[in-house]
Amino acid sequence: MLKRVDSIGFSGFQEVLLTFSLQRHPASPILHPEPASSWECYNVFNPSVIHYNALFHMHYRAQGLDWVSRIGYAVSSDGVHWNRLREPVLEPIDEQESRGVEDPRVTCIEGTFYMTYTAYSSAAEGRDYLAQRQDWDFFHDGLILPMIARSRNLIDWQRIGPIVSGEDNKDHVLFPRKINGRFAALHRRRPQVWIAFSDDMLVWPDESMAPIYGPRQGSTWDNFGVGSNGVPIETEFGWLSINHGYSQDHIYHLGVVLLDLDNPTRVIHRPADPIFWPQELWELRGDVPMVVFSCANPVVDGTVYVYYGAADHVIGLATCRLDDLVNFARFG
C-alpha cells in the first residue's frame, strides 16, 4: 500500500513523502509442513514461484525427520491454493550437498528454466574454513556453494555448477534475460551484494564481478547484513530488486533497490525504509524467529506476489500493485 504524506520541510516548502508496505494475503500462511511426510514434516519455507502457462509453479525448501533440506514442488491456479508432489524434485546427491539444498530461485531465460540454490555441505574442509569465521548467520559446521541447475519442465533438474566456490557466498539470483549479451546474476559476497556475468552459465569470471551496495551505517534495519531476494523485475525505470536486510537484532526486513537497466552496477535509488517485516505470530515464532525471507516476486496482471518463508517454518504471501512498488522504489 502506497501512501502520500505531505509535510513542511525546513526550507518552508511542502515536501511529499512516500510510505509503502506490502499487504499480507488473508489466507496466509498458504503452505504448512506435511505431518505425514518424512521429508517435509517440520518446515516448509523460502519458496520460489514462477508464473508460466497460466499457472503458479512453486519450488520450496523443506525439512523433515533428518533435518536435511530438500526442494519440493507445488502448483496452483490462483497462487493461493496449492497441490504438491509427494516427493522432492531436488535433493542432495553428493558430499557438497550432504546437509541440504536450499533457497531456490527459478527464472525462465530463452525457453529454459534455471534454478539457483545453495548447496550445504558438512565436508571437513568446510569446517576448517568455518573455524576462521565468527558470523552469526553463517553455517558454523559446513560449507556453502551458490549453485545453478536447469530444467525443461520444472520437475527434472540438471546441475550446472556454482557461481563461485571456496567462500561465504549465497543469496544468488539470475536476471530474467541477458544483459549486454551475457547472463547476469546478483550474489552476496559478504558484506555486499555483487553482480556477476557469464557467457555460458558455466564460468563466472571474477574479473567480471563488481560490488553494488552493502549495509548502511545509521540504518535501523539493514546496517549489519544485506542480500537479494527474488528475480529482478524489469521495468521502464530500471531493474526492481527486492532485497533483505537485518541489524544487530537479526530481525529480517524486506526492502527494494532500483538498478540501471543497462548497467546494473549503478544504483538509481534505494529507499531508506523497509517494505515488510515480521508482525504476525507465525512470523515472530518458529524454527528461526523474527524472519521473513522471500525468494519470489512474480508479477501477474499488474500485481506483485511476494512469497516468503516465515520464521523458517511456513510460507506466507504478501502483495502490492507493481506501479506502487515502482513509485516507491523511485521516490521513497
Image (cartoon, rainbow, N blue to C red):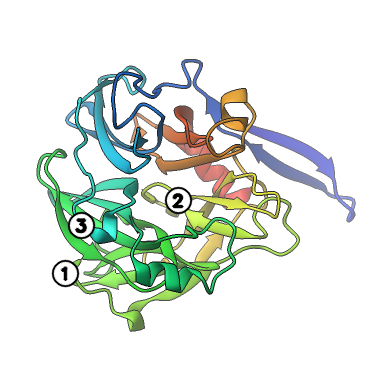
Query: According to the image, label 2 marks what residue?
Result: 240
Instruction: Report how far apart the C-alphas of labels 1 and 3 lie in the structure.
Output: 24 Å
What whole-number distance in Å separates the C-alpha atoms at marks 3 and 2? 36 Å
Which residue is under mark 3?
A: 94
Classify residue 290 by image quadrant.
top right
Residue 263 in view (yes/no): no
Element marked by disc 3: loop
**Residue corresponding to mark 1:** 200
Mark nearer the viewer, 1 or 3: 3
State whether residue 227 appears in this view: yes
Which residue type does callout 3 highlight? Asp
In the image, is residue 40 above or below residue 206?
Answer: above
**Dot label at residue 32:** none
**In the shown orientation, is residue 154 left or right of residue 126?**
left
Q: Nearer the viewer, residue 211 or 286?
A: 286
- Locate residue 189, reporting x and y percent: 46, 69
Residue at (27, 61) in percent of width and height: 96
